[in-house]
Amino acid sequence: MAEFNIVSMSGGKDSTATLLVARELEVPNLSGVFADTGHEHPATYDYVHYLAEATGVPIGWVKADFSRQIANKRKFVEIKWPEKGVPQAVVLAALDVLHPTGNPFLDLCLWKGRFPSSKVRFCTEELKRNPIIEQVFLPLMDGDSMVLSWQGVRADESLDRRYLPECDEVGGGLFNYRPILKWPVEAVFEAHRVAGIKPNPLYLQGCNRVGCMPCVMCAKDELREIASRWPEEVARVREWERLVSIASKRGSATFFTATNDPTVHSNDNISAATHGIDRMVDWANTSRGGRQFDMVDLIARTDSSRKCTSAYGLCE
Ligand code: SF4
């Protein structure tokens, strides 16, 4: 029976430590897989290349493709929107932007007509989990192979992760394995040091997590840091808000959920221009007395220990 050991890489410290453990154990057929969301900082892309070279472990890249879904949405917009009374100018504008760009994150949002949120978080599954399963795991699962999916998750990161088993069987010869589940964060950086592997440089530049830039679950201080260090990332999101708004029947799509702001009323005219990323950056630059958002969202965005904690370990 062939055995394949595949580490899901996010470009963050935990998946790197997991790769180092697997390499140390000299497991057979070891490789990494990195799902490119199209929404990572350039330093993370460079780091994944560096890791493959420095560790000698091949890291494959996968990307989600939403061309088919966007083509289906075009048909829907063309036929159904006019039937629902959507003005012709809105239909034509949507058709104008509804073309695959090749950027998975943007294409996913064009298809959905909205951005993911902490409550409707379809991004990890669509951009990371599904492409890895479809493009990497399934082709290896021939009924006679064992595939170990190595996941860099740690129990002390969240309640969701605290009760995960170290190993569980998915079925069809696929197993999840979480070798650093009980590790404290210090051990993660120690593993880098012992192996002579540099951590992702973003950790030295004010980021306490590595992943989408920014993540939809980004904390207030992270957003402030990102906006001041990398305004080009904010500019990219601003442009995405414009495009996704046009692809949305409501004519509005904001990267962070605008309706979580209690100063926004249901009959307010919400648009990306007035309630988009720039408004959130303004808020991120306020001190404690700044404009307040609802408590759930406020806690989410002011607590920098809060982050995307999917059980897959695909987002750090
Ligand atoms: S890092 Fe955040 S925005 Fe990116 S896929 Fe994960 S949860 Fe979604």
Image (cartoon, grey):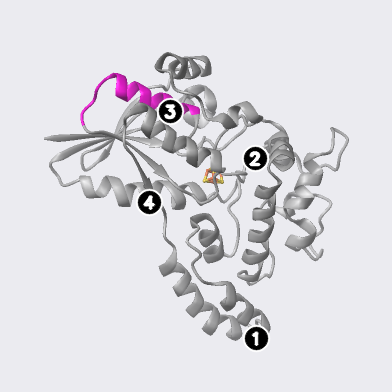
Residue positioned 45% across, 39% down in the render: 314
The residue that mark 4 highlights is 131
The residue that mark 2 highlights is 218
Task: Specify the quarter for ligand 1.
Answer: top right
The residue that mark 1 highlights is 88
Q: Magenta stretch: residue 6 in it?
A: no
**Mark-to-mark CA distance, 4 and 1:** 36 Å
Q: Are the residues tagged 2 and 3 within 8 Å (C-beta)? A: no
In the image, 233: left or right of 150? right
Look at the numbered disc 2 and say if its residue's Cβ is closer than 8 Å to ligand 1.
yes
Residue 264, horizontal then vertical, whole percent: 81, 55
In the image, 198: left or right of 236? left
Residue 179, horizontal then vertical, whole percent: 36, 23
Q: Amino acid at mark 4?
A: Pro
Number of residues whose C-alpha sits closer than 10 Å to that of mark 3, classed few (under 14), some (14–19) or many (20 or more)? many
Residue positioned 55% across, 59% down in the render: 106
Q: Amino acid at mark 2?
A: Cys
Q: N-terminal of the two: label 4 or label 1?
A: 1
Look at the numbered disc 4 and say if its residue's Cβ is closer than 8 Å to ligand 1.
no
The residue that mark 3 highlights is 16
Q: N-terminal of the two: label 3 or label 4?
A: 3
Q: Which residues are drawn in magenta?
A: 13-28
Number of residues whose C-alpha sits closer than 10 Å to that of mark 4, classed few (under 14), some (14–19) or many (20 or more)? many
**Mark-to-mark CA distance, 4 and 2:** 23 Å
Q: N-terminal of the two: label 1 or label 2?
A: 1
Q: N-terminal of the two: label 4 or label 2?
A: 4
Q: Nearer the viewer, residue 211 or 73?
A: 211
Q: Quadrant of the N terminus?
A: top left
Residue 165 is at least partly visible in this image: no
**Mark-to-mark CA distance, 1 and 3:** 50 Å
